[in-house]
Amino acid sequence: MSNPKATDIAYIHVAVDDLKGMREFLTRFGMTTTEWTDDTGDRLLYSRGANGAPYHHIAESGDNRFVGAGFEINHPEELEALAEMPGASAIEDITAPGGGRRVRFTDPNGYEITAVHGRQRLPLSEPQLRPPINTGTEQPRVGKPVRLETRPSQVKRLGHVVLRVKDFRTSEAWYKERFGFLSSDEIYLGEKENVVGAFMRCDRGDKPVDHHTIFLMQAPPSGPQTGMMHAAYEVHDWDDLMLGHDELEQGGYSHQWGVGKHILGSQVFDYWHDPFGNVMEHFTDGDLFDNSRPPGLAPVDALLAVQWGDRMQPRK
């Protein structure tokens, strides 16, 4: 099997200067956290959602920064093919919750990008369901008032990561070669030929997948050249997202943008700052495409536009 293809994003990996503070934030964000000591004796924080993956977020102690990300690979033959590519590590056992095997790379921006396979999954956690929704045309809920419990959102899984890159076309080619990503929408600045970013999704044939698993954006000439712009975690539904909004607000965390509905991807979104310089998104109701959908093309302004909700205001 000579053409490896990612089936989903597995996790993001960050370094923070306060693991306890990160644990408190992620608990409010709606994740389950586990502390782990690796082979070198360093403490790591592994946090997961409800879809059975052993973790969707890794935090290590250190200066605050984005370390890298992992992507799921379905077949051991694909892992072997990746290990033969330039810059690849040997196939290694994963000494972390869920085990499995991996191949590690350093991408053109210095990020540690890992292909993972065979991680042991946990039982699914069923979400708390609200009663059916009454609409203008259908009213299935009769005689059953809605009473929502005050609680964090119910994070299901990591949906995508957005990365700032030094050279978009170089990074795009690097990720597509290793993980088989397809472009869902390209982003241009000025002239349509000046493509500076792309929303890219996994190629799972005729199986629908998220509109994007990774978004790469060319860094402007001034400002940071690398770093994570945000990571997005799927929650159960709109009510669940709003409960999480209130929970994070009550916790005193800094809100960035939302609630609103994106144009590209269509998801309902809510963005928050963790205490360490990272932006974390709750989302629900996103677009799904199979591999038959051709790429779109949109201006950079579409990134900040909304179908409803507040448009993001540029920072002063």
Image (tube, rainbow, N blue to C red):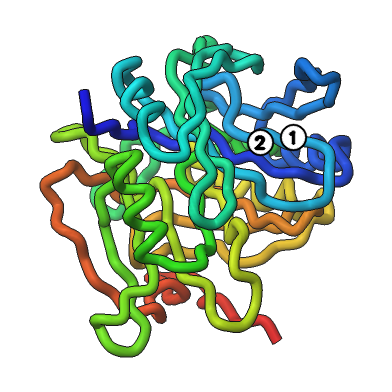
Badge 1 crowding class, 10 Å Cα cut-off, few under 14, some 14 to 19, many 20 or more, is some
Residue at which label 2 appears: 30
Tell me which corner region of the image, top left, top right, bottom left or bottom right, holds residue 133: top left
Circles 1, 2 touching at the beta carbon (< 8 Å): yes
Give how far apart the Cα atoms at labels 1 and 2 are.
Answer: 5 Å
Q: Check the image and name the residue furthest to the left.
A: 292
Image quadrant where one finds the N terminus: top left
Residue type indicated by callout 1? Thr
Residue type indicated by callout 2? Gly
Expressed as whole percent of the image width and height from the top left, the position of residue 262 reads: 41, 64
Say if residue 144 shows up in the picture: no
Say which element carries label 1.
Answer: helix
* Residue 27: numbered disc: 1
Say which element carries label 2.
Answer: loop
Q: Residue at position x 43%, y 70% from top?
A: 308
Image quadrant where one finds the C terminus: bottom right
Q: Out of 123 and 190, give the one closest to the viewer.
A: 190
Expressed as whole percent of the image width and height from the top left, the position of residue 78 reads: 31, 24
Q: Out of 138 and 20, give the one closest to the viewer.
A: 20
* Residue 214: numbered disc: none
Badge 2 crowding class, 10 Å Cα cut-off, few under 14, some 14 to 19, many 20 or more, is many
66 relative position to 250: left or right: left
Q: Residue at position x 66%, y 36% from top?
A: 30
Say if residue 171 shows up in the picture: yes
Expressed as whole percent of the image width and height from the top left, the position of residue 261 reads: 43, 63
Q: Is residue 155 above or below residue 190?
A: above
Tell me which corner region of the image, top left, top right, bottom left or bottom right, holds residue 279: bottom right
